[in-house]
Image (cartoon, rainbow, N blue to C red):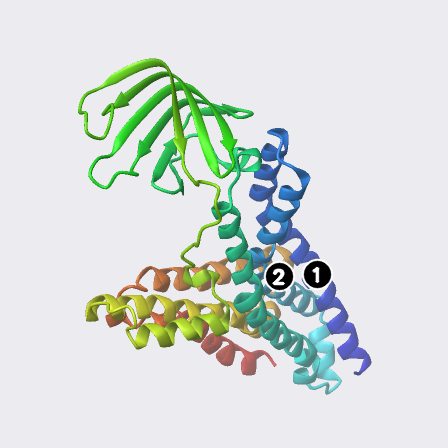
Amino acid sequence: MKIIERYIFKSFLSAAFLSWLVLSFVMSIAMLVKIVQLMIQGLPAKAVGLFLLVGFPETLYLTIPIALLVSSLLVFGRLSADSEIAAMRACGINMLSAIKWPVIFAFLCTLFGVYINNEVVTRAHDLKGDIVAAITVDVGIDLLEPGKFIKDFPDMTIWFASKEGNWIYDVLIFDNSHPAVSREIKAEKTLVETDGDDIIFNLYKVRIDPVEYDRPGIATADQYTHVMKDALKKRSRLRKQSDLSFKELMARLKEIKQNASGMSPDKLDKVYSVYRTNLHLRFVYASAAFVFVLIGIPLGIRSHRKESTIGIALSLLIAMVFYLGTIFAETVDKWPAFYPHLLVWLPFVFCFAIALYLLPKNL
């Protein structure tokens, strides 16, 4: 590696690392706020660490490509503003050799992104689902949020306004354990306890509709005990496409194509399209690192005045166009007629075409 190549690559790595730290912090703020709230409510440190562990990888598919884009714009914008690009051209230095190592590094980040998106992030999604499925009263009651309908218990939907320890207040329970009748149970406050695999709800100031499955009518009581049988038993969970590793996703696609579950042709096409789009989306997100550097270098050279402000603005604009395009394509993943698995590649093709147009003009 020549001195000039080492100088540019070192500047590129430094800017990329600092940008990644800032972006990771910004994207983690919401998660950190939630974790602090859970810690105040008494969530064990082990559970806090687990949530941090499974939450952090999900930010990498965004932070790494955007950090490389910011670094490309800032570093090459500064080189252009300081007339170092002009000096290198005057000395007969090939600009392709000057940008070689940032581009190689971006390609390596793309390969790393493929692994992250297909193995690490999917495992993190899977762990999150397992945490919810394996909920317990001691830890789980702290993880359940007031003001939301909770459907993680079998044949039971719960809503409550606030909680304090194992007490929950203004409780609304929909009991769907009977196939013919759905019961609605309201209570001013409820003490949640466990007995083996059962969860016991000790409800106070209760209104029940209907009283029993075979007795229509409304009843009220000062105290009522409702037992949820086998609620804490480990149960199987339907894994979504985002929970599957690359091999598992390919196996699921093959299974869907063979129509092992006997779905109708219309539903089969929609389900297959959803899984196939998710597979392509993982590679699109990974390839963002490579194409962002290719487009960031010539844009950085062109925007040589006030390079910091323009560089950050261009970074936000390019990233917004790229990710909005992928989000739009993902919204039509259930419509195979639109070929959503190909639509997700349009942002990449658009950015790559701009890079191919700008690179010869600026190098």
Name above or below for residue 132 compared with residue 285: above
Which is more toward the observer, 318 or 264?
Answer: 264
State the residue position of label 2. Answer: 67
Q: From the viewer's perspective, tell me whether residue 97 is left or right of residue 356.
A: right
Residue at horizontal 46 percent and vertical 36 percent from the top: 198
Residue at horizontal 47 percent and vertical 75 percent from the top: 354
Residue 101 image label = none
In terms of image quadrants, where is residue 304? Answer: bottom right
SS for tag 1? helix
Neighbour class for label 1 at 10 Å: few (<14), some, many (≥20)?
A: some
Q: Quadrant of the C terminus?
A: bottom right
Q: Is residue 350 visible?
A: no
Residue 57 location in percent, x, y? 59, 58
Q: From the viewer's perspective, tell me whether residue 203 is left or right of residue 34.
A: left
Which is more toward the observer, 200 or 359?
Answer: 200
Under mark 2, the amino acid is Ala
Residue at horizontal 56 percent and vertical 25 percent from the top: 165
Which is more toward the observer, 338 or 236?
Answer: 236
Under mark 1, the amino acid is Phe
Tag 1–tag 2 contact (CB < 8 Å): yes
Q: From the viewer's perspective, tell me whether residue 251 is left or right of residue 26.
A: left
- Identify the residue at the far right of this view: 3
In terms of image quadrants, where is residue 238? Answer: bottom left
Q: How far apart in space, not on screen, are marks 1 and 2 (Cα)?
A: 7 Å
Name above or below for residue 77 compared with residue 59: below
Residue 76 location in percent, x, y? 66, 69
Neighbour class for label 2 at 10 Å: few (<14), some, many (≥20)?
A: many
State the residue position of label 1. Answer: 17
N-terminal of the two: label 1 or label 2? 1
SS for tag 2? helix
Name above or below for residue 87 compared with residue 73: below
Which is more toward the observer, 65 or 249?
Answer: 249
